[in-house]
Amino acid sequence: MTASPRLSPALNVVVSAVQKAGRRLLRDFGEVEQLQVSVKGTGDFVSRADLRAEETLRTELSRARPAFGFLMEESGAHGPADWEWRWVVDPLDGTTNFLHGIPNWCISVGIEKRIAEDKTELMAGVVYAPALDELYWGEKGAGSFLNDKRLRVSGRRSLTEAVFATGIPFASVPRKAEFSAILARVMPQVAGVRRMGSAALDLCWTAAGRYEGYWELGIKPWDMAAGLVILREAGGFVSDPDGNEPYPSGNVVVGNQTLQPKLREMVADGIAAVAARRGATE
Ligand code: IPD
Ligand code: CA
Ligand code: CA
């Protein structure tokens, strides 16, 4: 899938890089189906595919912009220490889906700019889901797009019509009690809650108006850097449960203008209820 000619030069670089890494990941995804019978082999195979995708992205992006820094999921922060711009990269978001042959996975590349000693701003992002043939991209002030189509958040205003996405904590992740308390508040009021398994795509699908909102606690900068720009450019509202900037700390609540504040309140309320319960038993 090609992106629109309105792409800036830096975003063009990202699109070529994700398309290159995506072609290989897509071939690997085809292999995964064959490997499903050998459970042990699949995990190793997917971590090799993940590392290879990161390597491809690193090579392509640093060749095009040697002065940019990197923050990558697998290899951490590297490149010039005094970067003004850096790439924030998740080479494979939705690993569990990939491992199970579920097509909801993507590559996510955000572009962050240092605007003061201790302050950065997210400027642009690309999220590419090869198995869905969906390329999302956005740039501060220039809008966001799915392939060639301009994105706009959902216009639904009532909770009873709303579908929200979330991330459910799994075995090795904390905050299970908070998740249950939040879900108990959200579930009875809405049309549905979805757990599709890729934070970057959850943000993009909210930008595309498929979901009215999305919340998740404890996600990482590479899960959200690109998606947050895409969502904001689609008219989305973004905060943490207290109403503050969620990047890079990672507790996110997003949605349209009417429903994001309501979702934020339910998330904050769930977190507060767990804290109060813990306080009472100490
Ligand atoms: C995960 C996915 C998932 C979210 C987790 C992330 P990974 O990323 O985005 O949807 O719930 O918090 O860690 O491990 O597939 O790159
Ligand atoms: Ca991720
Ligand atoms: Ca990942």
Image (cartoon, rainbow, N blue to C red):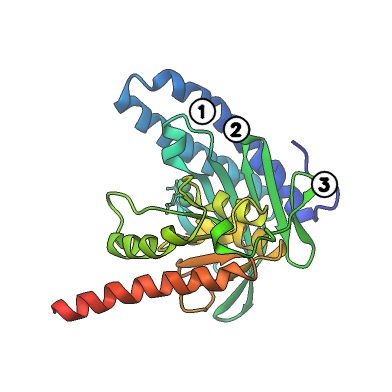
SS type, badge 2? helix
Q: Which residue is drawn at 79% across and 48% down?
A: 149
> Measuring 74% from the left and 54% from the top, which residue is drawn there?
151
Say what secondary structure mark 1 lies in: helix
Q: In this view, does 87 lie above or below 195?
A: below
Residue 246, image x and y in percent?
A: 51, 71
Q: Could you tell me if the residues under marks 1 and 2 are in contact, i.e. CB atoms within 8 Å?
A: yes
Label at residue 131: 2
Name which quarter of the figure residue 270 lies in: bottom left
Give the class, few, some or many, for how many residues have Cα within 10 Å of label 1's Cα (few <14, many ≥20).
many
Q: Among all residues in the image, which is located at the extreme left?
A: 282
In the rendered structure, the answer to whether residue 256 lies left or right of residue 275 reads: right
The one of 242 and 13 positioned closer to us in this rendering: 242
Q: Which of 119 and 137 is in front in this view?
A: 137
Q: Where is residue 204 in the image (x, y as percent from the top left)?
A: 62, 53
The numbered mark at residue 4 is: 3
Q: In this view, does 93 lie above or below 252?
A: above
| Circle 2 residues within 10 Å: few <14, some 14–19, many ≥20 | some
